[in-house]
Image (cartoon, rainbow, N blue to C red):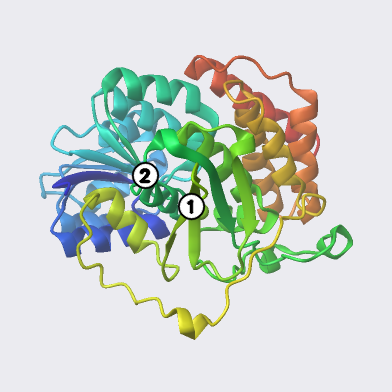
């Protein structure tokens, strides 16, 4: 079990759950970082007493400094500060639950200093997979997936050899608009999109779940994490979110991980694997559920998923960074009321159609592709 973590992205839903898990297991939190929720961050730091605290938003820096005055805690901010928090020397693992592309650089820096990574920031691998994987290999560190599906795949893989893996079955809740046609989706409001049937999450990922972009990003994440091809991953709609994903081995056996939808299980497993201490999580009763359902995804209504699938066939290029960057900009525009729901998928597709993917062999090239995708979206609002 890990003894100390640097937790970046500590005030979102994964961050809050991670603090609970760390407290329960007696894991020390050596660093905390948040985007702009300074009040929660101050409260967390006062109780956990980390060495370093980062507030990404520089306009909140003074407030956090004042709030932690006299406690001997180093307060930093901006991207430099985020990277410093991610690399805190006394932490054994960097737990990255930052939302969005902004999580990429701190992951790369942390791996460079030899840290293992617990990864809840899917954009890190989606956009930066080639750079991150090469660095992971060079430094001999490990990435432990935190996303519930990838944790399920990782856990299921413990029962066989990686070389005997035939296929990954990636499950999707389908989001709040499962079963709807494009016509029905056209009038979706921000309020509608922020209601998720099973998981309670931040606004960006909740919208990603509603457009199924989230599943597309997870497809690309799975390809990098488990070194498979796009065609080796089958996406299956499973409304109950009980079976969190599965693997099929070459003998035809399917091994899955099941449980109630509670992020504390994958968070804990990333920190304790292969041990499985008591988690305090509610127990799954299969008979309470009675039946579990599985369906094929609808790529016409959910064109973000199709765009990600296209990008996943160009792995190693900047295509995944393009769809991700376009989506981040489009979701922000949707949340601020500037575009309708269906426009998100159209803009992601337009970005992929118009921008030429390049070989993604440096952070600079990846960040440039991300930037171009965002600019393209902004120019078409
Ligand atoms: Mg997930």
Q: Residue at x 60, y 63 (%)?
A: 173
Image coordinates for residue 176, horizontal then vertical, percent? 67, 67
Left or right side of 62 for 152: right
Q: Residue at x 66, y 29 (%)?
A: 313
Q: Is residue 53 above or below residue 280?
A: above
Circle 1: element type? loop
Left or right side of 369 for 5: left
Residue receiving disc 2: 160
Which sits in the foreground, 236 or 181? Answer: 236
> Crowdedness of circle 2 by 10 Å Cα count: few (<14), some, many (20+)?
some
Residue receiving disc 1: 253
Left or right side of 203 for 186: right
Image coordinates for residue 201, horizontal then vertical, percent? 50, 61
Cα distance in 3D space between marks 2 and 1: 10 Å
In this view, the residue farthest toward the right is 183
Position of the C terminus, as image quadrant, is top right
- The quadrant in which residue 76 appears is top left
Q: Is residue 160 above or below residue 206?
A: above
Q: Is residue 259 above or below residue 76?
A: below
- Residue 102 is at least partly visible in this image: no
In this view, the residue farthest toward the front is 251
Which sits in the foreground, 231 or 130? Answer: 231
Is the Cβ of the residue at disc 2 closer than 8 Å to that at disc 1?
A: yes
Image coordinates for residue 156, horizontal then vertical, percent? 40, 51
Q: Is residue 108 above or below residue 73?
A: above
- Residue 302 is at least partly visible in this image: yes
Distance from mark 2 CB to nearest ligand 1 atom below 8 Å: no
User: How many circles with numbers are drawn on the protein?
Assistant: 2
> Crowdedness of circle 1 by 10 Å Cα count: few (<14), some, many (20+)?
few
Image coordinates for residue 278, horizontal then vertical, percent? 21, 68
């Amino acid at each position: 079990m890990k003894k100390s973590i640097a937790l970046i992205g500590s005030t979102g839903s994964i961050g809050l759950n991670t603090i609970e898990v760390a407290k329960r297991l007696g894991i020390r939190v050596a660093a905390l970082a948040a985007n702009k929720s300074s009040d929660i961050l101050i409260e967390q730091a006062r109780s956990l007493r980390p060495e370093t605290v980062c507030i990404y938003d520089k306009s909140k820096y003074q407030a956090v400094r004042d709030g932690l005055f006299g406690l001997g805690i180093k307060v930093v901010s901006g991207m430099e500060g985020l990277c410093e928090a991610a690399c805190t020397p006394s932490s054994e693992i960097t737990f990255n639950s930052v939302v969005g592309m902004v999580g990429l650089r701190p992951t790369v820096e942390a791996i460079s200093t030899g840290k293992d990574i617990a990864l809840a920031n899917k954009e890190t691998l989606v956009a930066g997979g080639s750079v991150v994987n090469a660095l992971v290999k060079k430094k001999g560190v490990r990435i432990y997936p935190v996303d519930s599906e990838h944790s399920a795949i990782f856990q299921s893989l413990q029962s066989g050899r990686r070389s005997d893996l035939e296929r990954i079955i990636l499950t999707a809740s389908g989001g709040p608009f499962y079963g709807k046609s494009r016509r029905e989706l056209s009038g979706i409001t921000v309020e509608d999109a922020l209601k998720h049937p099973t998981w309670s999450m931040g606004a960006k990922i909740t919208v990603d779940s509603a457009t199924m972009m989230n599943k597309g990003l997870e497809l690309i994440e799975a390809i990098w994490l488990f070194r498979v091809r796009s065609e080796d991953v089958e996406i299956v709609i499973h409304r109950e979110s009980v079976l969190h994903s599965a693997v099929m081995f070459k003998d035809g056996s399917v091994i899955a991980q099941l449980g109630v939808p509670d992020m504390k299980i994958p968070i804990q497993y990333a920190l304790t694997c292969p041990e499985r201490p008591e988690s305090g999580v509610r127990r799954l009763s299969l008979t309470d559920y009675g039946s579990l359902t599985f369906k094929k995804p609808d790529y016409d209504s959910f064109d973000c998923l199709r765009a990600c699938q296209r990008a996943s066939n160009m792995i190693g290029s900047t295509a995944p960074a393009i769809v991700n960057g376009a989506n981040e900009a489009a979701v922000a525009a949707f949340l601020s009321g500037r575009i309708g729901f269906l426009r998100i998928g159209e803009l992601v597709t337009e970005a992929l159609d118009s921008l030429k993917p390049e070989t993604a062999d440096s952070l600079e090239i990846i960040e440039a592709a991300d930037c171009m995708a965002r600019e393209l979206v902004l120019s078409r609002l």
